[in-house]
Amino acid sequence: MAEPIITFKNVSKTYTLYKNDRERFKALFIKPKHAKTNKALNNVSLSIERGEAVGIVGDNGAGKSTLLKMITGVAFPDEGEITVDGKVAALLELTAGFSMEMTGRENIYLKGYILGLSDSYIKEIEDKIIDFAELGDYIDQPVRTYSSGMKMRLGFAINVNIEPDVLVVDEALSVGDATFKKKCKNKIKEIISTGTTVLYVRQNASSGKDLFLRVIYLKKGTVMFDGPTDETLKIYEDAKAKAKKNNTASQTGK
């Protein structure tokens, strides 16, 4: 049996909702008495094995982003335990950590340092990143001169070329034109074939489904189903269709 690389044991996370930034600031000093809360994850337990490619689906507010933030170490649970055994690269906010005044090449090193990589390793993969990003002479221009698409290309190129143990993909294949999107998707397929663990998170159930054999369906912070791709996606689509039908019926009074 393969070794688990990610484990969630009875994980829960609740966020406090504030009306505005002023209320959020006040809460740093005075605990609000009647604050609204949202349970982003509710007693979630799951295990992902090393080398698995797993899809995660669910509507807005299902808990997908919170799950990812915990895997990447950005957020922490209120209850339960999380174990991640390896280096994680996340295709989430692709341009996070960039310095706008530094060049694209300099930002490759900056991002590498943030990810804990050594100078020698960054130098080793520098050309691969530059070739993949296809930025031409702009690689030596300040990132502030880049379009949003160019920044995303560079961010994607860095994250897919650092040879992570876990790659988290969230809506990142919307990068660039159709040709570059295909290149990104092929790169992820290549990464999967090397045995890297890949988590692919989408709201659109059918998008990218050829990349994985297993899908986890989240709803309001709870794992509703975890199983083979086609079976899980059918359950998810049926639930969406039922919810839409019920909503239409309530609006028409039938």
Image: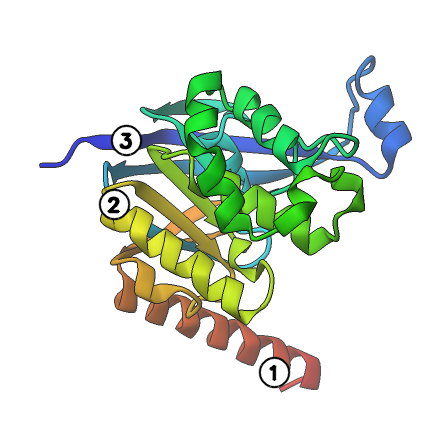
Specify the label residue 5 is tagged with: 3
Question: What's the residue type where badge 2 is placed?
Answer: Glu
Q: Position of residue 52 (x, y in %)?
A: 25, 45
Q: Which mark is residue 249?
A: 1
Viewer-side label of 3, 1: 3
- Helix, strand, or loop for circle 1? helix
* Residue that sits furthest to the left in the current view: 1
Q: Is residue 244 above or below residue 140?
A: below
- The quarter holding residue 3 reads top left
Q: Position of residue 112 (x, y in %)?
A: 53, 25
SS at mark 3 in the image = strand
Judge by depth and name the residue closer to the eye, 125 or 34: 125
Quadrant of the snapshot with the N terminus: top left
Separation of disc 3 and disc 2 at Cα? 9 Å
Identify the residue at the far front of this view: 137
Q: Quadrant of the C terminus?
A: bottom right
For residue 188, side relative to residue 148 (left or right)? left
Identify which residue, 181 or 251, lies in the foreground. 181
Residue 220 seen? no
The residue identified by callout 2 is 52
Whether residue 174 is visible to the viewer of this picture, yes or no, is yes
Q: Using the rendered view, name the quadrant where residue 36 is placed.
A: top right
